[in-house]
Image (tube, grey):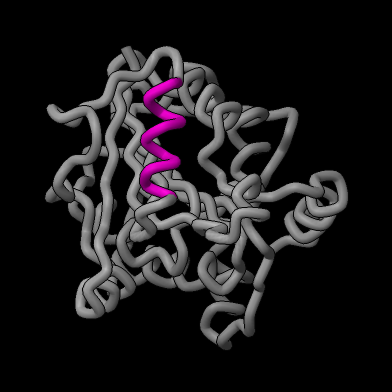
Amino acid sequence: MSEQLKTNNQQTESKRTIRSFVLRQGRLTKGQQQALTHLWPIYGIEYNANSSITIEDNKPTILEIGFGMGASLIEMANASPDKNFIGIEVHRPGVGACLMAIEEKQLTNLKVMCHDAVEVLENMIPNESLDKVQIFFPDPWHKARHNKRRIIQPEFVKLIVKKLKTNGVLHLATDWQHYAEHMLEVLSQADGFKNLSPTNDYIPRPEDRPITKFEKRGQNLGHGVWDLQFIKK
């Protein structure tokens, strides 16, 4: 990974005090470090506040924010070669793992970024260019004093609406009921969105959203999962 990327992340960290994530970098494996060094120039997109990402109009484009280790994103990209995928993740071990998987499966329809998603959306994603935005199992910030750090907030949703095409979809999933209720309240009050649930609340898990190991573990423990899909009118 380039020195420019490290510098960009450090500068962003100093400028933004309230975040939707905590930068828990963790320890890189040898393979992840090698991927960041050798595969990033092939499959990575450097953050540049003065340059928009080129979105191909002939293929639907899906943006995933917070892809973790990338397992479900890789599965979705591999299953849909007719679609372009962009993944954003701030944790370098996850980015490294995703790069390794992209190379292993020789995917040509997935690129990744390692930067704050809000700044990427604001500065690099053209308006009305995305067919879908998906955010699966974001940090719930379950303590009341930390709720303001949740990524799903009215201002963030307004930004998403601007970036989606007409009939573009925002797909959220969480295993925290209180966060699901918060998401539903925020999205239901957002201008420009319509709930795709016939009961105006949650939907069954769509078949195209893979079940992650994390989700399976939660299900075995009796945890619920809530999916929401809202379409831009």
Closest to the observer, 72 or 96? 72
Q: Residue at x 40, y 64 (%)?
A: 70
The x, y position of residue 109, in whole percent, is: 34, 46
Q: Is residue 188 magenta?
A: yes
- The quadrant the C terminus occupies is top left
Taking the image as shown, residue 201 lies to the left or right of residue 55, namely left
Residue 42: in sight, yes or no? no
Closest to the observer, 135 or 163? 135
Residue 222, compared with residue 128, is above or below; it is below
The x, y position of residue 166, in whole percent, is: 33, 13
Residue 116, compared with residue 10, is above or below; it is above
Q: Residue at x 13, y 27 (%)?
A: 198
Q: Quadrant of residue 62?
A: top left
Q: Residue at x 53, y 65 (%)?
A: 95
Q: Range of the magenta residues?
A: 179-189
Q: Is residue 21 magenta?
A: no
Closest to the observer, 92 or 189? 189
Q: Residue at x 65, y 71 (%)?
A: 24
Q: Quadrant of residue 122?
A: top right
Residue 156: in sight, yes or no? yes
Taking the image as shown, residue 60 lies to the left or right of residue 183, namely left
Q: Main secondary structure of the magenta part?
A: helix
Taking the image as shown, residue 225 lies to the left or right of residue 86, namely left
The x, y position of residue 53, in whole percent, is: 56, 32
